[in-house]
Image (tube, rainbow, N blue to C red):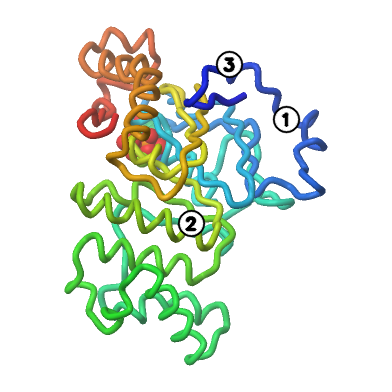
Amino acid sequence: MTESVGTENFVDIDQVKVGKELQASQRVNGVWPKLRVQHVSKSFQSKDRNFYVLEDINLEIQQGEFVCIVGPSGCGKTTLLNIVAGLEKADSGDVWADDHKINGAGTDRVVIFQEAALFPWLNVVKNVEFGLKLKGFNGKERRNIAIEYLKMVHLSKFQHAQVHELSGGMKQRVAIARALAMNPEMLLMDEPFSALDAQTRWILHYELQNIWLKTRKTILFVTHNIREAVCLADRIIILSTAPGKIKKEFLVELPRPRDDNDVNVAGYSTRIMKELKAEINKVMKCEMDADSCVECDIKCTTEGPAKTDIGGGI
Ligand SMILES: Nc1ncnc2c1ncn2[C@@H]1O[C@H](COP(=O)(O)OP(=O)(O)OP(=O)(O)O)[C@@H](O)[C@H]1O
Ligand SMILES: [Mg+2]
């Protein structure tokens, strides 16, 4: 089903068997995968037509796996993440977390967005403590847990700082500490580092890898940036566009922590970029030539084209 980029054993994703017939064998030692997305499709109603964003997405993520989703802008990455988070409802198909069907948001799945979305009226440590009150921890317990996770992101010295005193990278680290403090089963990250400069991103790639090595949280991470995905992921899933379908998967078998500038990371990235080129061209053609809409069935002219971020990513 999956290609290991270090070898040549491509297997066509279309051949992957999914659905009920495989459910019994999907349990490993009696344990369900942490996440199962089964036959998920999603469309949005635009002015005069139904716009299909995701089509028959099937995906499994095992406990402790770090999976990145990459694909051209507008292919439905955020929509898929939102469906997994329970913030958006699929038209058809199901999403399962362990053995229960996801019907809405839950504290077992915490989302980290592109903007850190901290509470500006609370200082750093109180931001991290915030959700713990709802979980029933007393004041002392909340503070201890918050400090533990602030130490993990190397921000304990800034516990009393105000949000406006932090850099963009520090804010994202607080958001990660706040998410981890909730001890979720799964972290869902939607381009959390895309607004940061290259050097800060590099530092956060390193920190996130170390956090993952310590906590072994299951992580689903959306990015445009292939090198970021190679740096972070156990497995990279490539979505095609209009409608979004899983086009291919890659295993990244490199030791951690990985460096963005490592020659092997660059090699993997080049290989995956080649896979994505056809998809990027499809989006570009659609943006530049309204007539191509018939071919790719993407909304182009009525509400503005989908964006395509080629620089630094895809
Ligand atoms: N609530 C909505 N109503 C109508 N259309 C929507 C809605 N949400 C998303 N879309 C459309 O669905 C498509 C997929 O959007 P989505 O945000 O999932 O893409 P994406 O892959 O995350 O893109 P990007 O990489 O730019 O973040 C886009 O064309 C978008 O315009
Ligand atoms: Mg998005």
x then y, percent, for residue 306: 28, 28
x then y, percent, for residue 163: 23, 73
Residue 207 position by quadrant: bottom left
- Observer-side mark, 1 or 2, equals 2
**Circle 2 SS class:** helix
The answer to which of marks 3 and 2 sits earlier in the sequence is 3
What residue is drawn where x is 70% and y is 51%?
A: 98
Instruction: Name the amino acid type tagged 3.
Output: Asp
Q: Name the residue under label 1.
A: 19
Q: Mark 2 points at which residue?
A: 212
Q: In this view, does 181 lie above or below 314?
A: below
Q: Is residue 153 above or below residue 257?
A: below
What residue is drawn where x is 46% and y is 23%?
A: 243
**Circle 1 SS class:** loop
| Camera-nearest residue between 262 and 167 | 262
- Asked whether residue 105 is in view, the answer is no
Ligand 1 image-quadrant field: top left
Q: In this view, does 83 lie to the left or right of 268?
A: right
- Observer-side mark, 3 or 2, equals 2
Instruction: Name the amino acid type tagged 2.
Output: Trp
Give the Cα distance between marks 3 and 2.
30 Å
| Camera-nearest residue between 118 and 212 | 212
Q: In this view, does 262 lie to the left or right of 179?
A: left
Q: Mark 3 points at which residue?
A: 12
Residue 173 position by quadrant: bottom left
**Quadrant where the C terminus lies?**
top left
| Camera-nearest residue between 2 and 167 | 2
Q: Does the residue labelled 3 lie within 8 Å of ligand 1?
A: no
Q: In this view, does 292 lie above or below 181?
A: above
The answer to which of marks 3 and 1 sits earlier in the sequence is 3
Give the Cα distance between marks 1 and 2.
30 Å
